[in-house]
Each structure stands twice: as structure tokens, then as C-alpha cells.
Amino acid sequence: MSALHPLTLEVNGRRQDLRLDSRTTLLDALREHAFLPGTKKGCDQGQCGACTVHVDGERVLSCLTLAAQAEGRQITTIEGLQNSDGLMHVVQAAFIEHDAFQCGYCTPGQIMSAIACIREGHANSKDEIREYMSGNICRCGAYSNIVVAVHDAADRVKKGATL
Ligand code: FES
Ligand code: FES
């Protein structure tokens, strides 16, 4: 058993003081130590995208990020998306309206990735969305509805919705 080290993470605007093995991934730190299980583990090898979170506003695979690498940076998970009134984020609302999920296991990663995809300016057409969302696998085959949801959310953002 290796030594535990103190580590402070800033998750969804809240400080989390943790004690972790230095090998702990950000994904495991979030799920098992910060008790935020919304971020999912589908492969733990960077191949499925279920673990996608934002670090300083950019999408990253938390299974390939050490918790220690995220210290001092702003981490956002699916649990941190609703606004202070508890209203859903525009991308969450679009996923529900367009039935963009079935089992829901890939969904947190899809949504975090979709927000970044729009922010990056890669949601201008359905083909572009397909390409830039291809790092997120969905075994339920919800892809066509995911593309419609992301396209619609991007449109609402263009019209002034908060991203
Ligand atoms: S769990 Fe991270 S990419 Fe699959
Ligand atoms: S909704 Fe089930 S894997 Fe995507």
C-alpha cells in the first residue's frame, strides 16, 4: 500500500480536500473520493469517452488524467452543469427533448463533449458534429438523435442561450 498524499481539487466550483495515492486518476478521484458518480468509466483506456469532463473549460478524458494533474485547475463534471436555480443546461435539455440517450451510461460524457464541441466551434453542421463527437461511443446507437440534439443546442446558443 503506497502512501496517500493530500490533494485539493476544485470541482464544480467547490473545493474538495482529498487524500489520494499519487496514481489515482481524475476519474477515480471524482467517482470514488469526491462522490460524484456522474462521470462514467466505460474502458479506463481512453477509448470510449464516457469519462469526459472539462478541465479549465476544455474536454479531457478523466481516465487518462491523473488527479494530481488537475490540481489548481477548474474541473466541471455533469453534476455541475445546472445553473444556480437548478435549471438544466441547454445541452442537457436538448438531449432530453431529442431522446439522445437510452441507457444513459455514455450520456454524461456525450453532454460534456457536446458542450466543448459547440464551444470549440465544431458544431456548424451535422457532419462536423459527427466527426467531432466521434470520440464518444454509444452502444445504444443513439447517434442520430445525439447529432440532432447537439445541432439544436448549438442553434440555441447562437440565438443567445448560455453555454
Ligand atoms: S473510461 Fe475514459 S475513455 Fe473510456
Ligand atoms: S445511451 Fe446507452 S451507451 Fe449511449
Image (tube, rainbow, N blue to C red):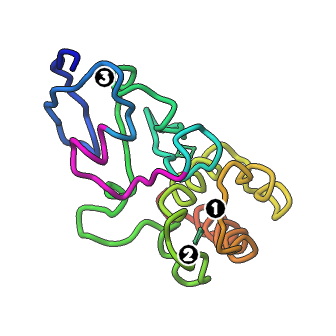
Residue under label 3: 71
Which of disc 1 and disc 3 is earlier in sequence?
A: 3
Q: How crowded is mark 1: few (under 14 residues within 10 Å), some or many (20 or more)?
A: few
Q: Residues within 10 Å of mark 3 (few under 14, many from 20)?
A: some
Is 69 situated left or right of 20 in this image? Answer: right
Q: Distance between the residues labelled 3 and 1?
A: 33 Å
Mark 2 or mark 3: which is in front?
3
Q: Is residue 15 above or below residue 158?
A: above
**Tag on residue 158?**
1
Which of disc 3 and disc 2 is earlier in sequence?
A: 3
Give residue 13's position: percent from left, percent from top.
Answer: 24, 42
Question: What residue span does the magenta drawing correspond to?
Answer: 29-42
Q: Does the magenta stretch include residue 33?
A: yes
Q: Does the magenta stretch include residue 160?
A: no
Give residue 112's position: percent from left, percent from top.
Answer: 51, 53
Q: Secondary structure beneath disc 3?
A: loop
Q: Residues within 10 Å of mark 2 (few under 14, many from 20)?
A: many
Q: Which residue is drawn at 48% across and 75% down?
A: 93
Q: Which residue is drawn at 79% across and 58% down?
A: 130
Residue under label 2: 94
